[in-house]
Image: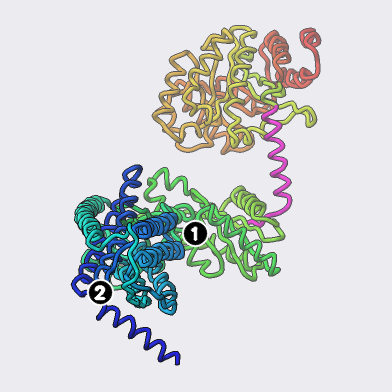
């Protein structure tokens, strides 16, 4: 029965369309509907491209156009209907039907503009469908015939139910960015209108009744036709205007796209211009990056080039790492940035693609530079410290040990100074190769800097195996010479060994203790291996405490200048004194120079210390008799200070001391470095009137050449040659030769370290200039020296026995006051 009913309804609708309507008028209605829909959509697009009042004006025109299109189509089809009886139109309902269309379509447009999402667009279409349905059935209610009208609701209700979703889908198609869907919008809307009209017309059953009269205000078809025709012409005009708008917008979009492509081609970065995930254009940089031509890329999806990139999750102006797949499947690491650019009514998505290969190469190079030694390629200090921390944690968990071998090259500075840094670098590279070959997979080799290397032995390491490898390191670097550009170079190595966890429970203490062991190896003759001992740490603490105390001593008056007399060999009178520094520690008492002078040289404190001695000695010597001279030692660090000449001049000037009374003593170590600068400094000192003497003569290198090249006034024979006099014939011969040679060169000669009457007599008999040593006096404080000077010089010229008595008395001077000395 249902099938029969459905077949009857379809037949009823078809009969209405074919038999009850004029075909030409229906074609005209379809044309007006299509033109009106196109005009409405075109004007709506133009409104969307506009802004402000212009947008509101054209949007309202689009809504009115849509309503008039539906209304005109409806009444043209009503005019095409041929009921074979008189017809007319009720004017109020006719006007209301037009209002229903305009209000419904306007409401749908407002809802549509609030969001472009599909559900909202579908709801907007349903609202428009309700307005069009109201138009049709209110308009049909305005249709008057000379008879009665009976409605078939089985056609009315389904027409509304079927047409409303169609209107919803048509609005979704209009809002879609897919061109295929967009082209379906107008046909769907036309279909919805057709369903409403023809179902509505088929639902009417007319029964002629000549007795029925039309109301007085009824409008005849001949009256309504010009109105419908005028609206149709207006719709055609709007369609033409919309067509012009579309052409202009298309041309503008085309021009904007061309401009965008031209700008994209100028950019160094790769640019993809896309719409709806489809590549519209690509610049030349993308072609170079991917190896694909524009024609190959245009029309393809973005995922073809950037398969792992999800554009929907990529925020505006957000950068993200990705991989670009180029020709032949080549993978290029890139960084992408997404930006939207409005072009006309549509929005283009521009994807900037930046090649990251060079950046990644640079970062990798920087990473290597940050963690690898550029000369040898070994891990540097930073990387080694990181590896050591990692391994100490691992070994602590696995209860295994590791060993640190700290290696310092012996005699490497000489290689650099004599053969140049290029040869030195080649030696370092060979050292790294030898160490890496020796260690292999038993540990890690690193260069800490300069000529210092370190080996970390991992795994099951014992003190025996670690010492064995350390000994092999010494053998590899010391026993086998290095052949660099045809030169045979001999160096050695001193190795400090520390085991984890016995010799240090953390990386810093382990390295520090290995370093202490290495310094012990160097101090014991180099070319050896020494393992860390706890006593080394104690010595380090003592040294640090001594260094801190020395810094305090420099600023708190704990340093004293003592003076040791020099006696003229011919007259037996004291002619000068050598200034020697002493440290009177508040708790340790008097500290000898041998304890702290080397520490001062290592820490750089020797420069302020030497300046203190120079200024203090000059000030105190200014109070002595004018014929008494002063000798002050200059350390190599002081002497190589460019301001040493001005410091000496300032000390003399501040003390009001004659320059001729000052004699500076330098060792041969001062002369080893820059002979040109050294000679200039010596000449400037002598030009001031200051005398220069060479201290510890005979213990250095090339002494005779120095006598010829440098302007010395005096030589001081080192105490090591005096100690054996007169019993040791070799010492006697050396001292005699130095005195004879100096006399021939016109130099003064001082014999220092004289401790016996026999040594004193030898110095006098050999014709030396002056004598210095404990036989005459130990160094003493300034006030004691002043008293000693008066007491000594007031005596007759001493013979050896007299000198011995005075020397014996001089020991007491350190503990007596000035009055007792003068009385004596």
Q: CA distance from mark 2 to mark 1?
A: 119 Å
Disc 2 element: loop
436 vs 102, nearest the viewer: 102
Quadrant position of residue 83? bottom left
Residue stretch in magenta: 530-552
> Which label sits on residue 218?
none
Pick the residue in front: 356 or 537: 356
Percent x, y of residue 254: 21, 55
Q: Earlier in the sequence, mark 2 or mark 1?
A: 2
Most foreground residue, 611 or 84: 84
Q: Which residue is mark 1?
A: 477
Q: Residue at x 30, y 66 (%)?
A: 74
Answer whether residue 273 is magenta in the image. no
Q: How many C-alpha atoms fall within 10 Å of the one at disc 2: few (<14), some, or many (≥20)?
A: some
Decide whether the magenta segment is chiefly helix, strand or loop. Answer: helix
Q: Is residue 525 left or right of residue 483?
A: right
Q: Residue at x 52, y 31 (%)?
A: 636
Q: Secondary structure at mark 1?
A: helix
Give the residue displayed 56% in from the left and 38% down from the top.
Answer: 730
Where residue 766 appears, as percent x and y from the top left, is 56, 25
Instruction: Categorize mark 1 by other alpha carbons within 10 Å: few (<14), some (14-19), many (20+).
Output: many
Relative depth, front residue between 67 and 409:
67
Residue 246 seen by the camera: no
Give the answer, above or below, for where 546 lies relative to 214: above
Total number of numbered discs in the rendering: 2
In the displayed structure image, the side of residue 464 where residue 433 appears, left or right:
left
Q: Which image quarter: residue 221? A: bottom left
Numbered badge on residue 82: 2
Q: Quadrant of residue 19?
A: bottom left
Horizontal and vertical percent position of residue 657:
56, 9
Left or right: 710, with 593 as reference point: left
Judge whether residue 35 can be spotted in this image.
yes
């Amino acid at each position: 029965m249902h099938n029969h009913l459905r077949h009857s309804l379809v037949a009823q609708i078809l009969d209405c369309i074919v038999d009850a309507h004029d075909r030409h008028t229906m074609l005209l209605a379809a044309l007006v509907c299509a033109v009106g829909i196109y005009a409405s959509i075109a004007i709506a697009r133009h409104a969307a491209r506009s802004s402000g009042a212009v947008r509101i004006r054209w949007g309202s025109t689009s809504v009115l156009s849509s309503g008039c299109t539906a209304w005109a189509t409806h009444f043209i089809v009503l005019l095409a209907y041929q009921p074979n009886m008189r017809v007319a139109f009720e004017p109020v309902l006719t006007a209301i039907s037009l209002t229903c269309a305009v209000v419904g379509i306007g409401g749908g447009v407002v809802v549509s503009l609030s969001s472009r999402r599909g559900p909202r667009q579908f709801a907007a279409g349903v609202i428009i469908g309700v307005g069009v349905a109201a138009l049709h059935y209110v308009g049909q209610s305005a249709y008057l015939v000379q008879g009665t009208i009976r409605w078939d609701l089985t056609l009315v209700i389904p027409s509304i139910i079927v047409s409303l979703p169609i209107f919803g889908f048509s609005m979704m198609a209009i809002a879609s960015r897919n061109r295929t869907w967009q082209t379906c919008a107008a046909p769907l809307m036309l279909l919805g209108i057709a369903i409403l009209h023809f179902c509505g017309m088929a639902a009417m059953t007319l029964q002629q009744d000549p007795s029925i009269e039309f109301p007085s205000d009824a409008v005849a078809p001949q009256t309504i036709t010009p109105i419908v025709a005028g609206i149709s012409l207006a719709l055609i005009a709007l369609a033409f205007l919309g067509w012009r708008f579309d052409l202009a917008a298309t041309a503008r979009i085309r021009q904007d796209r061309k401009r965008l492509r031209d700008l994209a081609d100028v950019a160094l970065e790769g640019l993809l211009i896309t719409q709806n995930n489809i590549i519209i254009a690509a610049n030349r940089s993308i072609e170079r990056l991917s190896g694909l031509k524009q024609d190959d890329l245009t029309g393809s999806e973005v995922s073809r080039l950037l398969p792992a990139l999800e554009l929907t999750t990529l925020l505006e102006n957000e950068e993200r790492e990705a991989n670009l797949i180029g020709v032949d499947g080549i993978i290029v690491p890139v960084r992408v940035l997404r930006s939207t650019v409005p072009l006309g009514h549509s929005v283009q998505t521009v994807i900037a693609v930046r090649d990251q290969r060079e950046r990644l190469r640079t970062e990798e190079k920087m990473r290597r530079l940050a963690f690898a030694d550029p000369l040898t390629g070994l891990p540097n200090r930073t990387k080694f410290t990181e590896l050591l921390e990692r391994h100490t944690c691992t070994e602590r968990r696995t209860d295994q040990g590791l060993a640190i071998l700290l290696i310092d090259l012996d005699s490497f500075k000489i290689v650099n100074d004599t053969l140049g840094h290029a040869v030195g670098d080649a030696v370092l590279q060979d050292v790294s190769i030898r160490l890496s070959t020796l260690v292999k997979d038993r540990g890690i080799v690193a260069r800490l800097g300069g000529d210092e290397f370190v080996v970390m032995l991992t795994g099951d390491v014992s003190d025996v195996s670690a010492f064995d490898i350390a000994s092999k390191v010494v053998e590899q670097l010391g026993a086998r010479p290095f052949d660099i550009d045809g030169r045979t170079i001999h160096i050695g190595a001193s190795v400090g060994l520390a085991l984890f966890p016995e010799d240090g429970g953390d990386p810093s203490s382990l390295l520090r203790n290995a370093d202490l062991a290495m310094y012990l190896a160097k101090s014991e003759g180099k070319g050896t291996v020494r393992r860390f001992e706890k006593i080394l740490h104690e010595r380090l603490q003592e040294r640090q405490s001594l260094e801190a105390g020395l810094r305090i001593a420099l600023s708190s008056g704990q340093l004293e200048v003592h003076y040791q007399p020099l006696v003229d060999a011919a007259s037996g009178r004291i002619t000068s004194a050598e200034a020697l520094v002493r440290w009177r520690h508040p708790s340790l008492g008097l500290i000898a120079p041998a304890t702290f002078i080397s520490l001062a040289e290592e820490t750089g404190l020797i420069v302020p210390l030497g300046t203190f001695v120079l200024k203090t000695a000059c000030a105190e010597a200014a109070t002595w008799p004018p014929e008494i001279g002063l000798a002050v030692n200059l350390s190599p660090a002081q002497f190589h200070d460019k301001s040493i000449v001005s410091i000496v001049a300032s000390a003399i000037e501040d003390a009001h001391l004659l320059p001729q009374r000052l004699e500076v003593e330098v060792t041969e170590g001062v002369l080893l470095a820059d002979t040109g600068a050294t000679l200039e400094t010596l000449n400037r000192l002598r030009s001031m009137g200051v005398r220069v003497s060479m201290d510890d003569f005979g213990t250095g290198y090339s002494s005779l050449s120095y006598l010829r090249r440098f302007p010395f006034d005096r030589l001081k024979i080192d105490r090591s040659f005096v100690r054996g006099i007169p019993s040791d014939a070799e010492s006697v011969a050396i001292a005699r030769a130095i005195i004879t040679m100096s006399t021939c060169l016109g130099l003064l000669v001082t014999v220092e370290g004289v401790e016996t009457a026999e040594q004193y007599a030898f110095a006098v008999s050999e014709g030396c200039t002056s004598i210095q040593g404990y036989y005459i006096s130990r160094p003493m404080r300034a006030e004691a020296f002043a008293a000693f000077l008066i007491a000594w010089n007031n005596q007759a010229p001493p013979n050896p026995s007299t000198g011995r008595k005075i020397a014996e008395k001089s020991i007491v001077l350190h503990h007596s006051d000035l009055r007792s000395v003068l009385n004596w």
